[in-house]
Every structure is written in C-alpha cells, then in structure tokens.
Image (cartoon, rainbow, N blue to C red):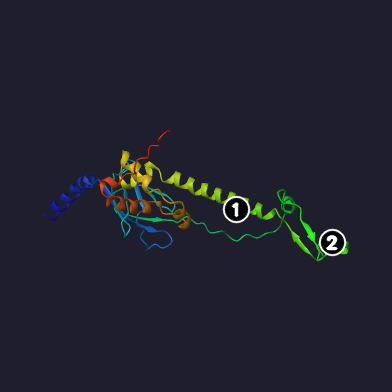
C-alpha cells in the first residue's frame, strides 16, 4: 500500500507544478533584512503583468518558469529575478546610497577668475569725515566705502540659481510622471488618464521638500482621492473662450 501511495505522489507532483501559474514572495530592505517594503513595483517583463507589494512586503503575480521579474521602488536599486521555479521568493532590495565619503585634500589650485573684479559692479568712492572725496591724507584710511553694483549682481545670480533649480525639478517630474508610468500604477486609459495627470501632477515644492520623492506612493494616494470625486469633477474645466473685439 505504501509503495502505491509513493508512486501516486511521484506521478501527481509534476502535474501540480505545471498547473501553477503564479509566484509569490516577500520583499525586504537589504540593510535591515527584517523590514518589509510596501508599494514595491513588481513587473513580469515576460507577460507585462504588474503588481505592488502589500504592507508586509508580500506580492503575488502571474508567472511561469523562465519568466523575468523586475523589482523597483524610488530610493532603491532596481533588481531582476529569473524564475527557475515557482516556489515562494524572498527579495532584498539595496537602497540608493547618496552618502559622500571622506576626501583628503592634498593640493589646492585657485581659479584666477575668483579674484577678478565683478564686471557688473560700479566703482566705489571713499567719503572722508569732512564730506570730501579723497581730500588730503584721509583718502587712504577711514571713511565709508560704497559699492553700488554688487547687491544687484547677487540678486541676479540668485534668480538664475532659482530658475535652474526649478528646471531641474520640472525635468525630473516630466521624466518620471509619464502616461506609461501612471497607467501601470492606476490602470487608467485615454481621457481619464490625461485628466488625472493634469489634476494631480506632483507639485514642485512637494517634490523638492521630500527627497527622494516617492512618486509611486504619491500617485496611488492621488488615485484614491480621485476615485472619491463625483464623475463630473474628475476632469479639468474647459478653457474659457476669449472674445475678439
């Protein structure tokens, strides 16, 4: 009897494995291997199926032996896994390191342009206590110095810096917050997708204040807010038509 039972199990096992068409597992932080990662994007590159990990890091996705899975999340390195079987998987994602190592300075070379005078600054004038410009020996010491151009130059440089910073964040938003990225997360298509992206484009100040910015979490939260809106409020109002005199 025991021999017949073992023979049945050996014959039935391959059919059970062939019938399985999904794989599950858990994703953890690489440095803290007991810390599960939520909202990790798990994508089957072989059949384009997509899912996100739950609060405890678990995932389950349609897959077969030989498929390639991709794991990605803002602030972490993207990793891939080739499936040689469909047993439960444990994934450890390493974080993106932005720490700077200590650098030993062994030599210094000063750029001569640093010591050059400001080309936009006006020439200063020295005023002596008697109110005369450069009178007698008082033009070599004491008195007040006025430079009437440096403040304006600093303001111009600050404006340029702010514009460059704004362009940098806008380019980051345009690169990541695309129709393909948003559609993979919230499954919207067509005009609904365009209206959603126009209403919930990540604000520049928010992206700037939370570094690195978690675009996936922001998009999912915005989607749940969008679902609570009445259908007539899920689209942008039409642009007003300007009357021509």
Q: Position of residue 46 (x, y in %)?
A: 33, 41
- What residue occupies the far front of the structure in this picture? 245
Task: Answer with mark 1 or mark 2, whichever residue precedes in sequence.
Answer: 2
- What residue occupies the far right of the structure in this picture? 136
- What residue occupies the far top of the structure in this picture? 245
Mark whose residue sits in front, 1 or 2:
2
* Quadrant, the C terminus: top left
175 horizontally vs 235: left or right: right
Q: Position of residue 137 (x, y in %)?
A: 88, 64
How packed is label 1: few (under 14 Cα within 10 Å), some, or many (20 or more)? Answer: few
Rendering quarter of residue 2:
bottom left
What residue is pinned by disc 2? Answer: 139
Q: Can residue 127 be seen at all in this image of the molecule?
A: yes
Q: Can residue 75 be seen at all in this image of the molecule?
A: no
What residue is pinned by disc 1? Answer: 158
User: Which residue sits at x=40%, y=51%?
Assistant: 215
94 horizontally vs 160: left or right: left
User: Which residue sits at x=64%, y=54%?
Assistant: 154
Q: Nearer the viewer, residue 196 or 189?
A: 196
189 horizontally vs 76: left or right: left
The image's mark for residue 190 is none
How packed is label 2: few (under 14 Cα within 10 Å), some, or many (20 or more)? Answer: some
Rendering quarter of residue 29:
bottom left
- The reply to whether the C-beta atoms of the residues labelled 1 and 2 are less than 8 Å apart is no
Q: Nearer the viewer, residue 188 or 89?
A: 188
Q: Nearer the viewer, residue 24 or 7?
A: 24
Q: Position of residue 133 (x, y in %)?
A: 82, 59
Distance from Cα at disc 1 to Cα at disc 2:
34 Å
Label 2, secondary structure: give it.
Answer: helix
Q: Nearer the viewer, residue 73 or 14?
A: 73
* Quadrant, the N terminus: bottom left
């Amino acid at each position: 009897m025991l021999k017949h039972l073992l023979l049945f199990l050996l014959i039935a096992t391959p059919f059970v494995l062939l019938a399985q068409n999904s794989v599950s597992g858990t994703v953890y932080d690489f440095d803290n291997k007991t810390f599960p990662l939520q909202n990790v994007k798990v994508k089957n590159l072989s059949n384009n199926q997509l899912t996100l990990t739950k609060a405890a890091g678990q995932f389950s996705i349609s897959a077969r032996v030989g498929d390639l899975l991709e794991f990605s999340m803002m602030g972490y390195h993207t990793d891939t896994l080739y499936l040689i079987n469909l047993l439960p998987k444990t994934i450890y994602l390493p974080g993106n390191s932005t720490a700077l190592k200590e650098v030993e300075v062994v030599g210094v070379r000063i750029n001569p342009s640093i010591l050059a005078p400001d080309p936009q600054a006006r020439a200063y004038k020295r005023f002596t206590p008697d109110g005369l410009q450069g009178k007698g020996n008082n033009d070599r010491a004491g008195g007040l110095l006025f430079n009437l151009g440096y403040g304006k130059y600093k303001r111009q440089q600050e404006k340029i810096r702010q514009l460059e910073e704004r362009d940098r964040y806008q380019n980051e938003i345009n690169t990541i917050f695309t129709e393909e990225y948003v559609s993979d997360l919230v499954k919207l298509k067509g005009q609904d997708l365009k209206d959603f992206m126009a209403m919930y484009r990540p604000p520049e100040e928010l992206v700037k204040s939370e570094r690195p910015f978690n675009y996936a979490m922001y998009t999912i939260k915005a989607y749940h807010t969008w679902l609570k809106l009445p259908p007539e409020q899920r689209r942008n109002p039409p642009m007003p038509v300007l009357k021509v005199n």
